[in-house]
Amino acid sequence: MSSLGPDTTAAAGPPSVPPAAAQVRVTRARRSTLAAAAAVVLIVAVLAYLPYLVYSGTTNLLVNFFTLLIMASMWNLLAGYAGLVSVGQQAFVGLGAYGVLLLASHGTSPFLAIPVATAACAVLGLPVWWLVSRLRSGYFAITMWVIASVCELIISQIPSFGGGTGTGLPGLPGNPTLLTADTYWATLACAVLALGVVYLLLRSRIGLVLTAVRDDETGARSVGVRVASTQRLVFLVAAAGCGVAGALYIVSQQFVEPTAAFSVLWSAKMIFITVIGGIGTIEGPIIGTIIYFVLQQTLAQYGTWYFIALGLVAMAIAIWARRGIWGLIADRFGIRLFGVGYWLSPAGPPDRDRGSR
Amino acid sequence: MSWVNAIIQGILLGGLYALFACGLSLMFGVMKVVNLAHGDLAVVAAYIGLGVIAITHVPAVWAFVIVVPVFAVIGYVLQRTLLQAALDRGVLTTLLVTFGLSVVIENGLQQFFSANSHSINIGSLVSDSFSIGSQITIAYLDLVILVVAVVVLLGLQYFLSASASGRLIRAVADDPEAAQISGVSYRHVFGIAAAIAFGTVALAGLAFGMYSQFDPTIGTDQLLLFAFEAVVIGGLGSLWGTLAGGILLGVAQQIGAQIGAQYELLAGQLFFLAVLVLRPQGITSRKETA
Amino acid sequence: MTQRNESAPVLDVRDLTVHHGQLRALHGVSLSLPAGGVHAIIGANGAGKSTLMRTIAGLHRPTAGSVLLDGADVTALRPERRVAAGIALVPEARRLFASLTLEENLLVGQTSARPGPWTLDEVYALFGWMRERRSQRAAQLSGGEQQAVAIGRALVANPRVLLLDELSLGLAPVVVRQIYDLLPRLVDSGLSVLLVEQDVSQALRVASYAHCLLEGRITLAGHPAELTTQQIEAAYFGVGVSA
């Protein structure tokens, strides 16, 4: 994406000739956005061809990357757009994983089980939403955590799931090369789909509603915005999104145990990635996941220090640079890759600070 | 008879949970903050207590005298710096920062103390007990913890209702801005509230460290959730409610354990969810008069 | 339009500009309040009256300009430090501590009190009914009673300047009149008053000087007796004022 640099900055430079005085033109996409769209198609095409070019170690790494990217994007949608801070999204990660296990142990191909488990997570999200939707922010966050804990405790009681010690995933193809490639393609497809859904959701009326609610919930309610149903939709999408990530997790690991599947570390990763990358932007989780991976690869030998550092950086960013690394980049160069906002031109420099109240 | 015993053990355990919960309840009541690092702070206190005893060889009771005041100071400083900075930026940032703190503490503990379990050695007191009838055995330690919890909650209630500082804490909890124009620095009062909350969490952490084995992850896996559940079950706004919530949670867990050891935690969690469904007063997003 | 021959002003507001986000709420507002003065600020809803009061009390940080108390710049002080310096605000909607008792509300008001005549006993003497009901929760008091407690809470800080923001809001006219009739006694005790009032005739009745605020600017100022209804209407609604 770095090759886009000069082009995008040029596109976002000072507007050349105002069309007419006192006239404001509202557009959704700019050249940087269109260029990004073309780049996305190209990148996905290259990524899809990758199993023919590289060793399985690389594709396995990318499977991990895309799974985290999906989760972070979902958490970003929840917290950054709908204002729902959850530290219990691991509930759906675990349910997605065990959903695949359940179907696979009854003879379904694990790959076919992925979409079914995903849909099941969205359905299970409904009663959960009924339970937590009335809670204030802090209580929402921690009650989600309790729910994840309940899911873990229940799943650990089921002997056919291997109880607390975990079990392998049956029904995977025996050919390791084929398995690696299939897993990779499935993950890539799910990631493209998940990010596409987030993008389309934010470009639709829903995105507008969410922005209004986030900026001023009372105000939005008073002008008749249907806050509750919009938040529910986002919650269910995030439930499905975390579910698909969990489904991909079990397929790639070929094994699952409750403590790992329902670990709060999933939420920690989602949160750190999103906060560091830039909460409330589509680009943020992508940047965040890249940063996370680079750090993980370079600092892995330092053990838990790596996670301590990540936590400290996320805290510092949450306080002092609330729009994250991407926010800093976007402010510096005035670029938007994915046009979910609106451009007003000519209306001075692009200044649409959505982080501040 | 074994059911009666379960209930009695639950009540004894409930004192400990109430001790964990009161700091969380106080911080939410005053700063409107759910401190996600609350459980980890208790574990830190237990580890520091362990270290103090190991280094100085003082009797375990002295750990309280040292660790609790140190934690109160840490609470005040942390509130005036990191937590206030987060609060100034809103609820989202506060949640992110306390969660970040939780992860940093947990991993820090793993780095320094490994993932192994420890407990604070208090000699034979941990197993000494007396019996009522043939089925009911009450450990002195459990009874002492319950008594301490009741005394602490009683003292805290008295402090809040009768002292000048308590009055300021209640005023700031009502309306920080109105407190400012009445000449009260709400930041300082927040600091005092955090100092008390941290002091009680240290007390609870040390008591827990004597009562049971602990490891770096137990703060988030169990203690935070227990404290939170006790607060919700008891209903917000009163420390007596918190005590009742802690005891009810303890009883629910012990009844679960009576059914089967694996149901101990689950019974507590399900009881909490049931309370959430049946009487969610106090924690739902009711609009308060400004 | 000359100020009365009084000594240096107690409160001096200089070129105050305040923004709420992108919105400019006050634009270069200046006024000075002499010792013993009762100045009124009148203006329509959204003119910036409350913003002005809150900025003087320290609840908003101005983008430009300064607030001086007895010649000392207090612009950088937090609200609680300004109380200690001698500025007390009776806020719009009263803002009592609802769960505290009447007396506890007054005691909180004493936190940063300066030495001076106003004690709890003096407040109880001013409002005869209070002593008997001092253990009642503030939330149980009527609107007028709450307003009295709010004034008492500010008085016990022994301020140099008392800021009264929209006393009459939600109160019966007779109650409002009773409260305003106390003003001379407050001024006699040595403080100066700056008040914001929607009810123009009430404000002009009690004030020694009036400032009219329109869209964040002072458009008219003068002694109530010297201002004509026409002038006030023009300044209040912006009719006939060239933009």
Image: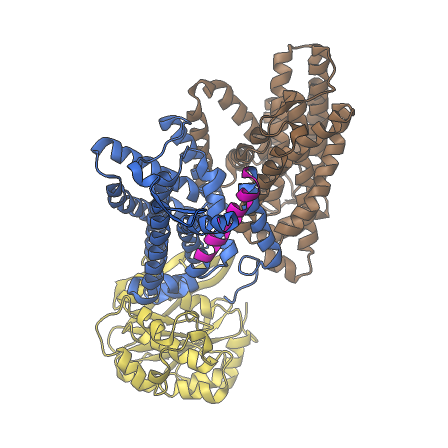
Q: x and y percent of residue A315 in the render?
A: 44, 38
Q: Is residue A24 visible?
A: no
Residue C15 location in percent, x, y?
A: 38, 63
Please give the range of residues in magenta: B243-261
- The image position of residue A63, as x and y in percent, is 64, 22
In the picture as drawn, the residue positioned furthest to the front comes out as B134
Q: Is residue A337 above or below residue B148?
A: above
Q: Is-magenta flag for residue B52?
A: no
Q: Residue at x 76, y 33 (%)?
A: A116
Horizontal side of A297 relative to B149 (left or right) equals right
* The quadrant where residue A110 appears: top right
C150 and B9: which one is in front? B9
Overall secondary structure of the magenta section: helix
Q: Colour of chain C?
A: yellow
On the picture, is C17 further left or further right than C8? right
User: Colour mode?
Assistant: by chain
Residue occupying image coordinates x 69% and y 41%: A237
Q: Quadrant of residue A316?
A: top left
Q: Give the residue displayed 69% in from the left and 15% down from the top.
A: A180
The chain letter corresponding to blue is B
Seen in the picture, residue A98 relative to A232 is either above or below; the reply is above
For the point 44% across and 22% down, the residue is: A303
Q: Nearer the viewer, residue A100 or B29?
A: A100
Residue A97 coordinates in the image, percent (x, y): 66, 30
Instruction: Give the camera-side residue of A225 and A153.
Output: A153
Q: Is residue B226 visible?
A: yes
Q: How many marks?
A: 0
In this picture, residue B112 sits left or right of residue C235: left
Residue B254 magenta: yes
- The chain whose colour is brown is A
